[in-house]
């Protein structure tokens, strides 16, 4: 949607008042990007998955479908740990259980994902070899599969970490994607990155070492100025990078309310706009 009925909000989920006030006086800076902490795996889910693997043109993919026929689908974009991470496959199955065909493609196209045993100092050099703004060929292949093989007519996208950045790019370039949910992904390049084509939800953790809050604040301000599509930027208190899909709620009781809330927010956003 564009123009009419636009609602834009920056939701801090009741962060301390002194912290919230500070955001309005912090100037956006890129200086802190030189030495952020690499992306930690967190809790890997002991999960076998309900879907199956297929080949879609030049990429492998994990597909999960609901029990009843539907013309609604969601593209799921992996984080740096790749398309085989059980945590991300859990989300594909979660979407299927709520009536969406979910396709999690190998957007690294056979290149090895990041591994927790790798040397952290190599993380950003490694990341440069997998540019998030170069995934369009893979997205086109998945879209073609969804339309021609699954008869999907209403399609959205979600992505985590690296996939959150991909999601942001896609919502700038693919008008046919009716909605997007970007989990802890922030486009940092100095390019036109704020003119969203359709509604997009941005989810961040308050204590994410990779995405400082001043950058989240800047994102919201620029979207408010330039985006005609509806969006929402939401920050979850005391949460770090990957909290919504890389933490087991049963062993993280303090984080559980926010983990579940992020998943609920995702589903509500998709239910509202992918219809």
Image (spheres, rainbow, N blue to C red):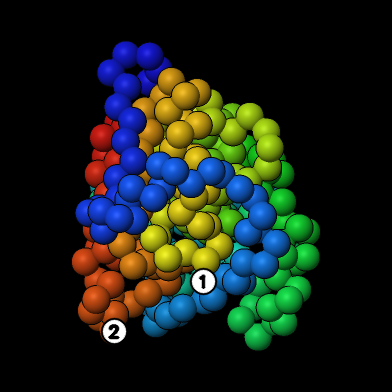
Helix, strand or loop at label 2? It is helix
**Residue 204 in the image: x percent, y percent?**
41, 55
Q: Which mark is residue 31?
A: none
Of 131 and 94, nearer the camera is 131
Helix, strand or loop at label 1? It is loop
Of 236 and 88, nearer the camera is 236
- In the image, residue 43 above or below residue 113: below
* Quadrant for the C terminus in the image: top left
Q: Which residue is mark 1?
A: 85
Tally of marks: 2
Of 25 and 163, nearer the camera is 25
Q: CA distance from mark 2 to mark 1?
A: 19 Å
Residue 209 visible (yes or no): yes
**Residue 230 in the image: x percent, y percent?**
36, 28
Q: Which residue is mark 2?
A: 251
Q: Residue at x 53, y 26 (%)?
A: 195
Q: Residue at x 68, y 78 (%)?
A: 120
């Amino acid at each position: 949607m564009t123009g009419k009925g636009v609602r834009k909000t920056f939701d801090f989920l009741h962060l301390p008042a002194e912290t919230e006030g500070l955001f309005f006086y912090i100037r956006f800076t890129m200086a802190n990007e030189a030495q952020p902490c690499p992306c930690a795996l967190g809790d890997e889910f002991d999960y076998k998955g309900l879907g199956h693997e297929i080949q879609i043109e030049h990429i492998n993919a994990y597909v999960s479908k609901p029990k009843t026929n539907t013309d609604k689908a969601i593209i799921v974009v992996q984080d740096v740990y790749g398309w085989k991470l059980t945590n991300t496959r859990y989300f594909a199955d979660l979407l299927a259980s709520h009536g969406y065909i979910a396709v999690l493609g190998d957007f690294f196209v056979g290149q090895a994902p990041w591994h927790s045993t790798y040397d952290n100092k190599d993380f950003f050099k490694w990341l440069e070899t997998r540019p998030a703004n170069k995934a369009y060929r893979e997205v086109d292949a998945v879209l073609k599969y969804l339309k021609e093989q699954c008869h999907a007519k209403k399609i959205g996208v979600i992505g985590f970490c690296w996939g959150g950045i991909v999601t942001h790019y896609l919502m700038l370039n693919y008008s046919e994607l009716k909605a997007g949910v970007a989990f802890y992904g922030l486009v940092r390049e100095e390019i036109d990155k704020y003119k969203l084509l359709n509604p997009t939800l941005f989810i961040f953790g308050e204590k994410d070492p990779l995405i400082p809050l001043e950058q989240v604040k800047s994102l919201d301000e620029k979207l408010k100025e330039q985006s005609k599509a509806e969006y929402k930027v939401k920050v979850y208190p005391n949460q770090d990078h990957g909290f919504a899909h890389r933490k087991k709620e049963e062993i993280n009781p303090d984080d559980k309310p926010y983990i579940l809330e992020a998943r609920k927010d995702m589903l509500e956003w998709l239910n509202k706009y992918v219809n």
